[in-house]
Image (spheres, grey):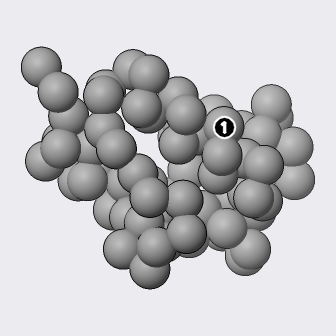
């Protein structure tokens, strides 16, 4: 699946970001993590189980950013 063909309305906020959900891979995760750090000032540990939980779905990632963003 190509992300360029997906609209916001196509994304289920509860669906997994990786594998069967949006189908993101490790490069996508790195790019997304860097973008979140730059845009919102959040800190993510690359290889932690906690980070994997934050990247479980759009909703989980959104909750993490909302709770940890730098103003």
Above or below 45: residue 39: above
Q: Position of residue 55 (x, y in %)?
A: 48, 62
In the figure, is residue 14 to the left or right of 19? Answer: left
Number of numbered tags placed on the structure image: 1
Towards the viewer: 15 or 69: 69
In the figure, is residue 6 to the left or right of 39? Answer: right
Towards the viewer: 5 or 34: 34
Is residue 56 shown to the viewer in this render? no
- Residue drawn at (18%, 44%), measured in percent from left and top? 68
- Residue drawn at (78%, 59%), measured in percent from left and top? 25
Point out the image quarter for the C terminus: top left
- Residue drawn at (74%, 74%), measured in percent from left and top? 19
Q: Position of residue 10 (x, y in %)?
A: 60, 47
Q: Say few, some or many: other residues with alpha carbon within 10 Å of mark 1 (under 14 / 14 to 19 / 20 or more).
A: few
Q: Position of residue 31 (x, y in %)?
A: 66, 37
Towards the viewer: 2 or 10: 2
Is residue 4 shown to the viewer in this render? yes
Dividing the picture into quadrants, the one containing residue 3 is top right
SS state under label 1: helix
Dividing the picture into quadrants, the one containing residue 42 is top left
In the figure, is residue 30 to the left or right of 40? Answer: right
> Disc 1 designates what residue?
31
In the figure, is residue 10 to the left or right of 14? Answer: right
- Residue drawn at (81%, 35%), measured in percent from left and top? 5
Above or below 43: residue 45: below
């Amino acid at each position: 699946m190509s992300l360029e063909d997906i609209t916001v309305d196509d994304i289920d906020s509860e669906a997994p970001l990786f594998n069967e959900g949006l189908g993101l891979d490790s490069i996508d995760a790195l790019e997304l993590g860097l973008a979140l750090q730059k845009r919102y000032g959040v800190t993510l540990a690359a290889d932690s189980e906690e980070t994997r939980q934050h990247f479980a779905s759009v909703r989980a990632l959104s909750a993490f950013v909302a709770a940890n963003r730098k103003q």
